[in-house]
Amino acid sequence: MSRRVEVTTGSRLHFGMMSFGTPGVRQFGGVGAMVDGPGVRLRITAAESLLVTGEQAMAARRYAEAVAQADWFTHTPNCRIDVLTTVPAHVGLGSGTQLALAIAAGLNAFFDCQPPTTEQLAHAVGRGRRSAIGMYGFLYGGLIVEAGKFDDCQMSPLISRVSIPCDWRFLLVRPENRQGISGETERQAFEKLPPVPTETTAAMCQEALLGMLPAALQGDPAGFSESLYRFGQQAGNCYAQWQGGTYASGELTKIVAELRRQGVAGVAQSSWGPTVFAVTESPGQAEDVLARFRRTAAGHRALCEIVHPRNHGATIVVYTD
């Protein structure tokens, strides 16, 4: 009898972190959401040794080898992993976390291991060191608020997860041939950035808990959008010393302004960019905004995509023949 596992994920939008650098308060924390594309899709089948093919194969192999060293994983990972699709790397969509967790969860299912805890799954592939939005998004989907943490070894606790109205759409926009920062450069940025004032953290917490969450629960796109925009500006200002302003470049600033001029209030930068996203209340509004945006100077050379909210976690399907 042969065995096959297929894993499919979405992408993570990160609205911004609420705290870093201030002693005595939780570090990082933040708000984010999962959307259904672009995403990771991979297939695991039997093989005599570990073989990884497809997009970002080298990274996928590193994650598989890391899983093999985890305490909860008790098998030699002799299998073939075909990475069929991936999320573009370093554009603010959580590509590394989604690929890493898809590998870890897929191997766990393929070898029928005892399910690891959330912390074990994340630590096996080195995720969740700062933000855990992508981790909780992989598991549950939806709109996510995490609390931040006092200890680097901790996993930031999940404060709330709610579904996003299914009629809403996210318009993803990013300039061609641009990437955000990651890895060692990101670590240096957090070391050099000034601490987030506690007043700013309090204002962002208020937007998350009294603005975005209840608006999503009540299906209030106008309330959600205005709160998202304010949250994004507050978050972006925390990085202004590094990225030169509220957004990662002058080009992104123009994209945000143009989308808002088209009548979309809820526009923000995801993580370090360069992806900007806009929230619309319906598929029709998303199509209309996209058509008009593409006719503007800001939209001429931008990569644009309309995606659905993803209100469920990764799908992991085991086939036996």
Image: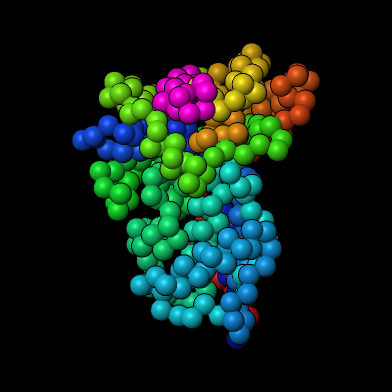
Looking at the image, which residue is at 41% across and 63% down? 124
Q: List x then y, in percent, for residue 162.
A: 42, 39
Residue in front for this viewpoint, 233 or 241: 241
Q: Is residue 289 magenta?
A: no
User: For this view, does 23 lie left or right of residue 17?
Assistant: left
Q: Quadrant of residue 217?
A: top left
Res. 216 in view: no
The quarter of the rendered structure image containing the N terminus is bottom right
201 and 135: which one is in front? 201
* Secondary structure, magenta segment, majority class: helix
Q: Is residue 232 magenta?
A: yes
The correct choice, above or below, for 256 with respect to 317 in the image is above
Range of the magenta residues? Answer: 226-245
Rendered view: 172 above or below 70:
above
Residue 320 spot, x, y in % from top left: 59, 78
Q: Number of marks in the image?
A: 0
Examine the rendered structure and indicate whether residue 272 appears above or below residue 241: below
The residue lying at 37 percent from left, 72 percent from top is 72
Farthest residue in the top direction?
261
Residue nearest the observer in this picture, 72 or 244? 244
Specify the color scheme.
rainbow
- Whether residue 179 is visible, yes or no, is yes
x and y percentages locating residue 265 in the rendered image: 55, 18
Q: Tell me which corner region of the image, top left, top right, bottom left or bottom right, holds residue 210.
A: top left
